Amino acid sequence: MIIVPIKEGENIERALKKFKRKFERTGTIKELRGRQAYIKPSVKKRETMKHAVYIQKLQNLED
């Protein structure tokens, strides 16, 4: 559970901003989006390899 302490006279907008920041750091939304559809381990591995190749190409172009 996320608890955001509010000081006396603090603006509610600031408290909401703190809450949103804490909520985002927990990674709940990211996890929910990931669970919407099952991705086979082989597909995950293929995607990570494609990403690694892409990053490697970018690094080679810089050098």
Image: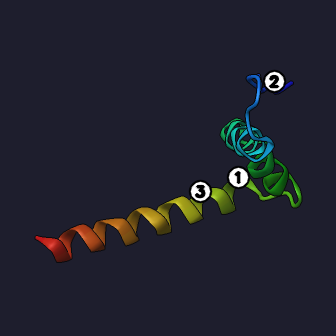
Give whichever of discs 2 and 1 has the lower sequence position.
2
Give whichever of discs 2 and 3 has the lower sequence position.
2
Q: Is residue 48 left or right of residue 58?
A: right
Label 1 sits on residue: 41
The circle drawn on residue 3 is 2
Q: Quadrant of residue 28?
A: top right
Total numbered labels: 3
The residue type indicated by label 2 comes to: Ile
Residue at figure coordinates x 72%, y 42% from the top left: 27
The circle drawn on residue 45 is 3
Q: Residues within 10 Å of mark 2 (few under 14, many from 20)?
A: few
Identify the image quadrant of the N terminus. Answer: top right
Could you say where residue 62 lies in the image, as x and y percent from the top left?
A: 16, 73
Q: Is residue 19 left or right of residue 21?
A: right
SS of the residue under disc 3:
helix
Residue at figure coordinates x 78%, y 59% from the top left: 39
Q: Classify 54 as above or below 49.
A: below
Q: Nearer the viewer, residue 40 or 33?
A: 33
SS of the residue under disc 2:
loop
Q: Quadrant of residue 18?
A: top right
Compute the Cα span from label 3 to label 1.
6 Å
The residue type indicated by label 1 comes to: Pro
Q: Are marks 2 and 3 in contact (CB under 8 Å)?
A: no
Could you say where residue 33 lies in the image, as x and y percent from the top left?
A: 81, 57
Residue at figure coordinates x 85%, y 50% from the top left: 32
Q: Quadrant of residue 54?
A: bottom left
Q: Nearer the viewer, residue 13 or 57?
A: 13
The residue type indicated by label 3 comes to: Lys
